Image (spheres, rainbow, N blue to C red):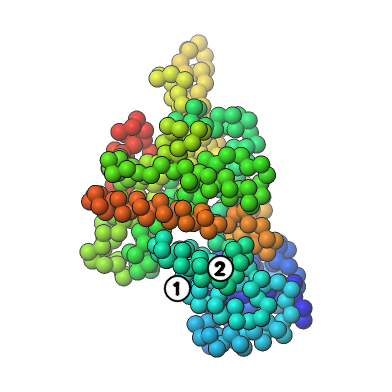
Amino acid sequence: MNYDVCITIFGGTGDLTFRKLLPALYTMSRTRKLPVHSKILIIGRRDYDTAAYISQARDWIRKFSRLPYSEELLEDFAAHLEYYRMDFSDRSAYEGLGQAYEAMQAASHIFYFAVAPRFFSVIAAGLKTITGLTDGKIIIEKPFGETLASARELNRQLESCFGPDNIYRIDHYLGKEMIRNIQTIRFSNPVFANAWNGKMIEAVEISALEDVGVETRGGYYDASGALKDMVQNHLFQILSILAMERPEAFTGEEMHARQLEVLKALRPVSPEDIEQSLVLGQYDGYRKEPLVSPESVTETYACMRLFIDNERWSGTPFYIRTGKKTGLRETEVAVIFRRPDAETEPDILLIKIQPTEGIYLRFNIKRPGDSEEVITASMDFCQNCILENQVNTPEAYERLLTACIEGERSWFSQWDQVEISWNYIEQLKQLAASRNLPLYPYLPGTRGPREAETLLNTFGHHWLE
């Protein structure tokens, strides 16, 4: 049979596939975002046949699908699936895979590397041996390397097998509804567009807090930490979207160019400013987590004060914080506008990314009645509180898989963005180590070390709760 597209998932029996990819593809099948004539080839080492694999996947899809589960619709989706047992680290196994592809006669290929990063180049090199596949698209998950040097080497290896435009670096944050809404809020509303600059905005806060600890990821996390795991990718992406100039057109190329300008304009932290620019913390009990060193000095919390050295944002601080076991699962952006005078509260625009999705705006009004007192009022829009929006809003992986099928690259990270982000964070970590920057303890369930609040207080700001 001839297929329009074959989506191959390496690591098809892993957590990412069962929790995210299969539920997303199932929903795409239901919403007709998955091409009718498509094949989903699941690559795994376990001794399944296709029927056994579908039986295993059923409960995961039932639990994690965005839309209500339907056995009948699952059967329709299952018709796309085929399980292929293979050790993808064995180069000789790719000959048999090539024969399977030849019989399939697919017009295009997408290869999802849902595996540990150390296998990315192994799989890419194996696919390169199969005639006619190097024009396919590959999707890789973070981390894109473990250091700047390893990221560069990984990129070199991947680009030796597939062209740069065929590599899709997925950052699931970029698929979230309110991340994508930032540009609309900003550029489609003159009330914000005309005030989106340092003359009108006093400060910007970006928070990504988690209520869980490292759970089963202790080994990975202890070699990474909050700066590499969250700031270098997710939060720098949000920062670049918030601060970028308006693209001439909202194409992938234009969007990436404007985001890159922001990342290049990030002011390097000087040795003299390190203690006023970075606070690192570690939650009590982290060193007792499975696979974590009992003497670990890995940060589970990071708070940063950044500046963007360009005309638009001169003098406006961008505060970033992320941490584990903070007692709160919340990602949001707070835009704090400048006060008209010292007695008046600032207007605040809050963009809620997860778990609540929406916009909150605080502004000033006169107290009703005879009083001339100025008080604050607010308007609150909850996007995902509306049932229709819950049904019609794609989950991040649905959106990004659909974009890859359609060749839309706007919401995938480009190599130059990855490289400059890695370089910034690596230099920052080296500076922190050379200056013996303290690693502050904090209690699980708190918002991180109190020194993070003190940092903002020093400059007349505070974290909005």
Residue 465 in percent (x, y) is at: 41, 40
Mark number displayed over residue 118: 1
Residue 430 in percent (x, y) is at: 31, 54
Q: State which tag comes first along the sequence, 1 or 2.
A: 1
Residue 263 in percent (x, y) is at: 48, 47
> Disc 2 designates what residue?
159
On screen, residue 285 versus residue 75, left or right, reads left
Identified at 72% across, 76% down, the residue is 106
- Residue 118's place in the image compared with 171, above or below, is below
Q: Is residue 325 visible?
A: no
Identified at 46% across, 50% down, the residue is 235
Identity, as a three-letter code, of the amino acid under mark 2: Glu
Residue placed most toward the observer, 53 or 261: 261
Identity, as a three-letter code, of the amino acid under mark 1: Arg
Query: What distance separates the C-alpha of mark 1 from that of mark 2?
Result: 16 Å
- Residue 318's place in the image compared with 18, above or below, is above
